[in-house]
Image: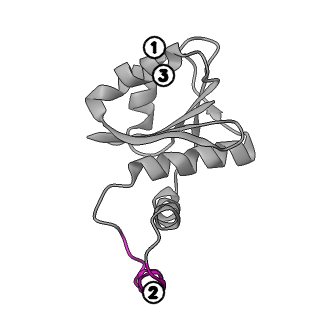
Amino acid sequence: MILALDPGRDKVGLALVSSQGEVRRLEILARDEVGDEVRKILDSGDVSTLVLGNGTFSRELARELAAVIPGEVELGLVEEEGSTREARKLYRRDNPGSQLKKLLLQIMDWQPALPLDHYAALVLAGRYLQSGFLEKVEH
């Protein structure tokens, strides 16, 4: 399993994805809940890799999580640039509207009123699964 996090100052997107790309969990956590929640997920023993986006707050979160990550779990960063745009596309795919609404949303480059950090984390997991590349973070 891959655990991907899209770090932010106040909230963190979380995606738990199988190595085949099957989404097992998708949610947004408050920043102060992340350590405990990651610890619970890692306690299951199913996670082999923890992926963080390499943007804002990623190194800070990596340092915090290093204390709770077992040595056998790989920790690394993936390129975050453009993940928000891809997250909007995934959200639209998972939440389709009418054909007219779809067309209008594409033309207007619509952005939903709700946060999409969890979909951004899903994008990061997909990037890792496609490339297999991580900028390793020691822990």
Q: Position of residue 43 (x, y in %)?
A: 50, 13
**Tag 1: amino acid:** Val
Residue 70 lies in what quarter of the image?
A: top right
The answer to whether residue 107 is magenta is: yes
Q: In percent of the image, x 40 and y 40: which residue is there?
A: 7
Question: In the visual, does 31 lie left or right of 45?
Answer: left
> In the image, which residues are magenta?
98-111
Which is nearer the eye, 46 or 117?
46
Q: Is residue 26 above or below residue 91?
A: above
| SS state under label 3 | helix
Whole-angstrom CA distance, mark 3 to mark 1, is: 11 Å
Would you say the residues marked 2 and 3 are in contact, meaning their CB atoms lie under 8 Å apart? no
What residue is shown with label 1? Answer: 68
| SS state under label 2 | helix
What residue is shown with label 2? Answer: 107
What residue is shown with label 3? Answer: 41
